[in-house]
């Protein structure tokens, strides 16, 4: 019988070796090296936490929040480093979605 933890660790190592993963890492390093991109990115992450808190409490985004969302979208699209990062992250997420589907298939079969 295969040790499930060994398989999970092997999967983790495999993900880190994927070109798509490496592209996201390199893109994040480029953001960290650029003060403007890093500031926007850090502000965006803080805003994401704010949105998560709203969602957890069942609150709907206010017009101010919606405007802020649009502003972040514009800032990200206007910054080549951030735009590239999110595009590369999206490419990686396709693989992660497939892996998640495969891993949770046995659980779904139970129900």
Image (cartoon, rainbow, N blue to C red):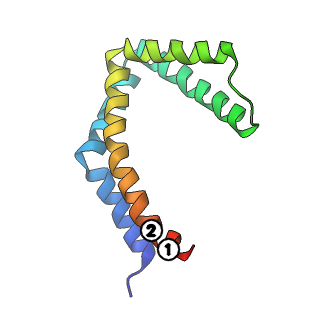
In the rendered view, does 89 fall on the left or right side of 54? left
Q: Quadrant of the C terminus?
A: bottom right
Task: Give the secondary structure at mark 2.
Answer: helix
Question: Where 10 falls versus 62 (above or below)?
Answer: below
Density class for disc 2 (Cα within 10 Å; few <14, some 14-19, many ≥20) is few
Q: Is residue 35 visible?
A: no
Q: Which residue is mark 1?
A: 109
CA neighbours of label 1 inside 10 A, class few (<14), some (14 to 19), many (20+): few
Residue under the point 38% across and 16% down: 77
Q: Residue at x 33, y 50 (%)?
A: 95
- Residue 36 - label: none
In the picture, residue 65 is in which quadrant?
Answer: top right
Question: Residue 33: horizontal and vertical position, in percent?
Answer: 37, 21
Along the line of sight, the residue nearer the viewer: 22 or 97: 97
Tell me: residue 19, above or below residue 8: above
> Mark 1: which secondary structure?
helix
| Residue 111 or residue 30, whichever sits in front | 111
Residue at the image point whose x is 38% and y is 71% from the top: 7
6 over 17 or under it: above or below: below
Please give the residue where the numbered disc 2 appears in the rendered image: 105
Marks 2 and 1 close (CB-CB < 8 Å): yes
The CA distance from mark 2 to mark 1 is 6 Å
User: Picture coordinates of residue 42 (x, y %)?
Assistant: 53, 23
Where, by quadrant of the figure, is residue 64 drawn? top right
Which residue is pictured at 48% across the width and 22% down the height?
Answer: 41
How many marks overall? 2
**Residue pushed farthest front?**
111
Report the residue that reaches farthest toward the left: 19
Q: The N terminus is located in which quarter?
A: bottom left
Q: Position of residue 39 (x, y in %)?
A: 49, 16
Q: Which residue is at the front of the view, 48 or 11?
A: 48
Please state the horizontal and vertical placement of residue 85, each as a whole percent of the image.
Answer: 35, 29
């Amino acid at each position: 019988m295969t040790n499930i933890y060994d398989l999970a660790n092997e999967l983790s190592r495999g993900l880190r070796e994927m070109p798509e993963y490496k592209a996201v890492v390199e893109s994040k390093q480029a953001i960290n090296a650029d003060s403007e991109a890093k500031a926007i990115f850090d502000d965006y992450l803080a805003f994401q936490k704010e949105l998560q808190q709203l969602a957890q409490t069942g609150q709907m985004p206010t017009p101010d929040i919606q405007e802020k969302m649009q502003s972040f979208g514009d800032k990200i699209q206007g910054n080549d480093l951030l735009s590239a990062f999110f595009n590369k992250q999206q490419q990686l997420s396709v693989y992660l979605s497939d892996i998640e589907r495969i891993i949770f298939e046995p659980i779904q079969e139970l129900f």
